[in-house]
Amino acid sequence: MPRAKRTELLYALLFTAPFLLYLLVFHGYAFVRAVFFSLTNKDLFNAPSFVGLANYVYLFRDERFLLALQHSVSFTLVVTVLQTFLALVMAAIVNQKIRGIIFFRTVYYVPSILSSAAVTLIAIWFFQRNGFLNSIIGWFGAHGPVILAFLGIFALAQAVQVVWERSRGLPVSVFDPALASLSLLVAIAGSWILCALGWVTPREAAPFDLAWLSETRSFLGIPIPLWAIILLNTFTTIPTLMLIFLAGLQDIPRSVYEAASIDGATPVQQFFHITVPMLRPVTFLVVTLSLIGTLQMFDQVALLGNASSLDSIITLAYFVYNNVFNSNVPGNVGIASAAALFLALLTFAIVGLQRLFGISEKGY
Amino acid sequence: MAAQIARPKAKLDERFLARRRWARVGWVYGAMLALTVFFIGPFYVAFLGSLKDNPLEYPFRYYFAQLQPANWAAAWRLGQQGAGNPWTGGFAPGARVPFEVAYFVPRDQQPVPPTVVVPTRRAGAGLSAVLVEVQASQYAKVSPVEEVSRTPAVVDGEPGQIVRYRFTVTYPGSGPKAPRLPLDVEAPRTQRFYDATLDPNRLERRGRVASWDSITPGFFGYTFRNYLRVFNEARNPDTLESLFLRWTANTFFVAIAAVVINLIFASMAGYALARMYLPGKNLIFGAIILLLAVPAQVTFISNYLVLRDLGLIGALWGLIIWIGIDMARVFLMKQFFESIPREIEEAALIDGATPLVTFFRIILPMATPALGALTILTFQGVWNEFFKATVILSAQQNNYTLPLGLNFFRSSYGVQGDWGAMLASAFLSMIPVVILFVVFQRYFVEGVSTSAVKG
């Protein structure tokens, strides 16, 4: 090896040494040790002895683990589907060439930059039995008649206008924005008059009363406290995914859309036949990120703490932590390692499956 | 027939199209604003909640005493009268605090002056129960209650009169300054509280008893009462040092240390991986990609044990070392260095500079934009780090970082449902990241969209 090359190698090693050391100790060594621990009855203080696959067998007999597994998988599926879809729709809305778009994009990103601890704390307040969420749901419930009247008048006004314009021979669409603006004014005035006359009044609905966090019931097989976490997680992650979609959207040439609209494609058709297929690689990335992130969800469960019963919110990541630090018999390192490795396998498997079947590539 | 339908299309005049275009822009902005409300609204409402005496008030009201300018002015004036401090108030020797309350008395009742007491009250429940606070009740003198005026009025459809009373709370002689001057005013049955110089913090027993946390609160003390509580109530029982300040300092320390470590080592590693001769480079990349997908739950047990062997459990350095050098940042820097032309290094090499000098003197100064992005993203990530902090620091209350502190507040105040301090602590902990975001939002937003799609 020439001298110059040897010096370069020496410097390269010098430059990368701290990083490689960190990688080796905190990732490589840690991973190998986790595999080793999972085959032993290791606890936090004693020397381990080999127990073979007993920990894995134990896991699949442990009700709490099965519960955590069920929660993690359903949480991951629901959140991934919800946030991918909503993020795509939002990105399509935000992808407009209008003034001030940068400002709006920045504002939407706020929930994503804040610490999960602070946001979860606020969310717990939000989800209290007499918290803001129930209060606002109750308001909408009570004002149902008014809202219905408003929507009815809006639809009616829009229909009348569309029919009128079409009878004049103008090819207006049902959602024509100019007509909709007028319909909006008519609907506001109309519902205001109806309310003032007392023909339509908010009803005396019982306040919406759902103890989100201490509820023991389930909805669609997922405990309600976990639904609260699903809503929270979706809310905070949408903006990040939206930005990734947005970057992808901006790579789609405008000319494709122009060609489509000349051929008479409606915006909805354009969305499903151009936007969705052309975003396939980005969607794949988003779904992968979302799967990995949601499978490892820990913070919200830990922060909810005793606000909810553990059995209604426990996930795999929390199960692992709980077995080492929190449970009645702390330091079940062997079992925790086995569960953690199972979580890792599950992550690889789900991401691999997604790649294999190209779920995201079929569009919606 | 077909010709007839086709004919009007030509009539689409410019004004029709322009109108439609403007309306469309209007709807787009409307949608944007609706999304803004959706993403910012919850924080706005929670912030309002953090100002309230009882954030769990149901149904939620958007107007409450802490938002009334009249109360701001009164709190400011009273703070000045109580301790010469219009911001945070207090009760100091020589104070003379005139105060008025008004009660509604139904028509067929005789007005009776209320009783006024300066009670002895703990600073707060839970955390601060151990603290001994100077109590204003020991030093305050309340003058006799005088009636000022009677005005006929109809309240809630009930005829009667509003009777105004006045009294003065003084601090004669000398003594220590009390941080607060709490007050309870109790009227006889059938009279109802109407208003006062400063709106009370609580109204109990159908409006007969009005109580104030402090009638000399100062502007902050009244409007941002919960925020001051965060600093004042959570204290280390031994040193009386404010825990929240301590946690903030800890978080800054950890975040800054992690940023410096990442700045130096991630850029060095990124540079070497981008430019230098290193056999097995691809092996390293493969390992990184694989390890990135391994959940932190797999590795944390071993890391905990390693740090325990080093005696770093419960220590901030333990957390810093574990946070270590972020693989994603190494990638970011590698990506950047690959875009720098090679001629620059070749020139440096010809001039006889060693790679170390070339890197620190020539390459690194060119990398300022990338280093800026790295600084901001790392700071934000570390500031919000929860899992590693929980594992390492849980047992050491003094060494908590803010996310752990919030968790601690949640568990100690949550039982009593005292949400004021919890919400306030959440907002206080956000301030540095929000400032960073407002100033450098470009880095955050671009960091996500470019690095994710192209990386």
Image (cartoon, coloured by chain):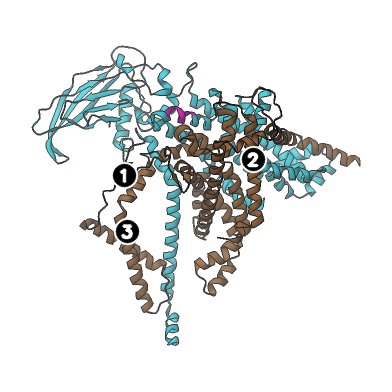
Q: What segment is highlighted magenta in the picture?
A: B408-413
Residue B153 in percent (x, y) is at 13, 38
Q: Few, some or many C-alpha atoms within 10 Å of disc 2 (few <14, some 14-19, many ≥20)? A: some
Most foreground residue, A359 or B151: A359
Most foreground residue, A243 or B146: A243
Identify residue for label 3.
A148
Instruction: Please give the chain letter of the residue carrying mark 3.
Output: A
**Quick check: marks 3 and 2 in contact, CB under 8 Å?**
no
What amino acid is found at the position of numbered circle 2 in the picture?
A: Phe
Which residue ends up furthest to the right in the rendered image? A2
Is residue B81 inside the magenta stretch?
no
Instruction: Please give the chain letter of the residue carrying mark 2.
Output: A
Report the Cα–Cα distance between label 3 and label 2. 50 Å
Label count reads 3
Q: Residue at x 22, y 27 (%)?
A: B100
Q: Few, some or many C-alpha atoms within 10 Å of disc 3 (few <14, some 14-19, many ≥20)? A: few
Identify residue for label 2.
A342
Q: Secondary structure at mark 1?
A: loop
Q: Colour of chain B?
A: cyan
Report the Cα–Cα distance between label 2 and label 1. 44 Å
What amino acid is found at the position of numbered circle 1 in the picture?
A: Pro
Q: Which chain is brown?
A: A
Quadrant of the snapshot with the N terminus of chain B = bottom left
Comes first in the chain, label 3 or label 1: 3
What amino acid is found at the position of numbered circle 3 in the picture?
A: Leu
Identify residue for label 1.
A207
